[in-house]
Image (cartoon, rainbow, N blue to C red):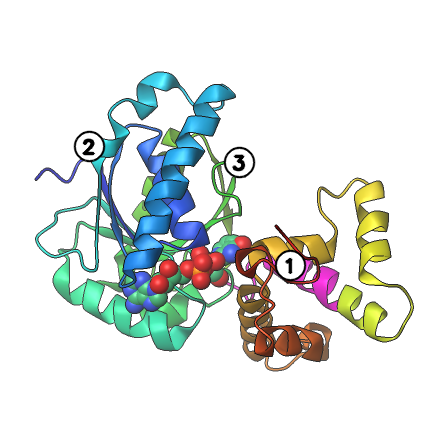
Amino acid sequence: MSADNLVIVIGSGTMGRGIAQVALSHGFRVHLVDPSTSQREFAHKAISQGIGRALEKGQVPREGTLGWPERLTMGPDWHDRDPAWVIEAIPESLDLKGPLFTQLDQEFGESVWLASNTSSIALTAIQGMARRFPHRVGGLHFFNPVPRMALVEVIAGMATAPDFVTAAHALVKQWGKEPVTVPDRPGFLVNRVARPYYLESLRMVEEGVTDFEACDQVFEGAGFPMGPFRLMDLVGIDVNFSVSQSVFEQTFYDPRYRPHALQQNKIWLGHLGRKSKRGFYAYE
Ligand code: NAI
């Protein structure tokens, strides 16, 4: 199997299936990996609906999507495949991503680029788990929803080769996205600024300064596409909390980035946002 345009995407959740959809919409072949059969099945349905909708709205070139079902494979593992890229989109924890990158580093030859879609974990920490060829490891941080959001943060860890950055820019441009190289610092660029947006809003609600609906109304009225609470529901309150914890730890506990108990309480109750039909808001 030729490596030319095969991308292995690991994790078929919100981000993995979005990345897969975009690659499939631009003529690439995708192998989507997830241990969960139900997640894979859901991803297949979501990709099919997503491509259909994007075609109806003229958001993707029809020729790019031709034959996409034959270009998509799925499974619990990636064995015997020869990709140009592997893009990881599993939960935001170095305890999970680290061992995965150790395995990827062992199993794939040096010419295969290994990217993480991490929102906040230092790429240098991930490279520390891929010590055979750490120079081919870097960050490709897509935004949610992937098919609609143009920005991709490209992150070079301390050991990343300049060729990774060049190849990453070329790849995401082929997918109609706008790559921007950002530093390997906690939260990179977007999440460093976005953390206080969420966390200060949570504090204001706890202090009774405002309620969450009014807070969203104000920001949306001021031109933000989504207020902080609607956005947390979209991202997933669990994902948002993991990113908050990760940025807090990596800033050596800078109080500006302290996570909020309300995030934890929502998770304990299973109110994760849109994906569980209940977060700050309720969904049909
Ligand atoms: P998610 O919880 O929707 O999906 C994660 C998927 O990974 C699940 O389907 C799960 O079954 C699978 N998985 C878990 N362990 C695995 C393993 N070892 N191998 C293969 N699959 C495995 O998570 P989501 O939201 O897609 O986030 C994934 C990554 O993308 C995280 O690093 C997150 O920080 C980042 N991200 C998330 C954004 C968001 O808005 N949700 C935005 C940008 C980045």
**Nearer the observer, 19 or 186:** 19
* Distance (Cα) linking label 1 and label 2: 35 Å
Can residue 254 be seen here? yes
Mark 3 Cα shell of 10 Å, populated few (<14), some (14-19), many (≥20): few
Residue denoted by label 3? 148
Q: Secondary structure at mark 1?
A: helix
Instruction: Name the residue rendered at 34%, 36% in the picture.
Output: 23
Please provide percent x and percent y for residue 241. 59, 70
- The stretch of residues the image draws in magenta is 184-199
Instruction: Name the residue rendered at 8%, 53% in the picture.
Output: 80
Residue denoted by label 1? 232
Q: Is residue 188 magenta?
A: yes
Residue 96: quarter of image? bottom left
Instruction: Name the residue rendered at 60%, 60% in the picture.
Output: 273
* Distance (Cα) linking label 3 and label 2: 23 Å
Residue denoted by label 2? 70
- Does 116 sit above or below residue 98? above
Can residue 165 be seen here? no
Please provide percent x and percent y for residue 95. 37, 78
Q: Secondary structure at mark 3?
A: loop
